[in-house]
Amino acid sequence: MSESAPDRGQDVQSGILRLQGLTTLGADVVVAITAYPGHVHIDSGLWRKFAAENPLTSKTASAWAVLSGGTLHDVGSLTAPDSVAIARAFARRRGPLSLPLLKQISPKTLTALIEKKDVEIPPVETLTLIPEPDGSVTRRIVVPSGSTCGRADSKASGYH
């Protein structure tokens, strides 16, 4: 092993799973990866391919959160009819989650998303609150005090 090659045993012991050199991710592999309790690193090209082939839905949201490394630069809005379910899937992710480019979200979706204590999104006052995608009515939204919701100083620096 060369000096520059990572020690894969050390990675696994520290909770990091590196999946380098893969060209595809089968459904079974994605299910197993989303269940992994540690951090998963995949090549950015594979992430892009996965995201292109698997649009963000309530069924793919957990995989998006894990495979992106917890930083979802590709999510600028949560406007689909199943956005609340997507936000709930994001909220269940272990570890921090950042949506630094989020601009549009409905009140119910925002409420579901900020149930996650370590989610980072742009300041709430900069978000455009849209009508509920499912057509339901929202009467009120409350952002819990102490929430990291609205932190502009996201420490996340990329996908992986």
Image (spheres, grey):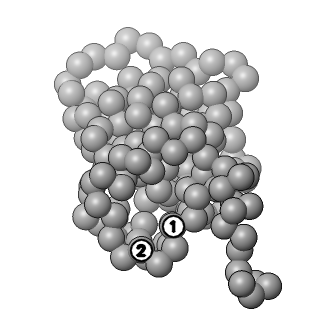
**Residue shown at the point (34%, 16%) measured from the top left:** 138
**In front: 66, or 156?**
66
In the image, taking residue 130 as reference, residue 45 lies left or right, namely: right
In the image, taking residue 42 as reference, residue 133 lies left or right, namely: left
Residue under label 1, please give it.
Answer: 19
Type of amino acid at the residue the image marks with label 2: Leu
Label annotation for residue 158: none
**Circle 2/circle 1 CB separation < 8 Å:** yes
**Residue shown at the point (26%, 34%) measured from the top left:** 82
| Residue 107 against residue 9 in the figure, above or below | above
Type of amino acid at the residue the image marks with label 1: Leu
> Can residue 122 be spotted in the picture?
no
The image quadrant that residue 96 belongs to is: top right
**Quadrant of the snapshot with the N terminus:** bottom right
Residue 57 drawn at (x, y percent): 28, 44
Q: Element under label 1?
A: strand
Residue 59 drawn at (x, y percent): 28, 41
**Quadrant of the snapshot with the C terminus:** bottom right
**Residue shown at the point (62%, 40%) measured from the top left:** 95
**In front: 106, or 19?**
19
Residue 71 drawn at (x, y percent): 56, 54
Residue under label 2, please give it.
Answer: 22
| Residue 117 against residue 53 in the figure, above or below | above
* CA distance for labels 2 and 1: 7 Å
> Can residue 30 be spotted in the picture?
yes
Question: Badge 1: how crowded within 10 Å, few (<14), some, or many (20+)?
Answer: few
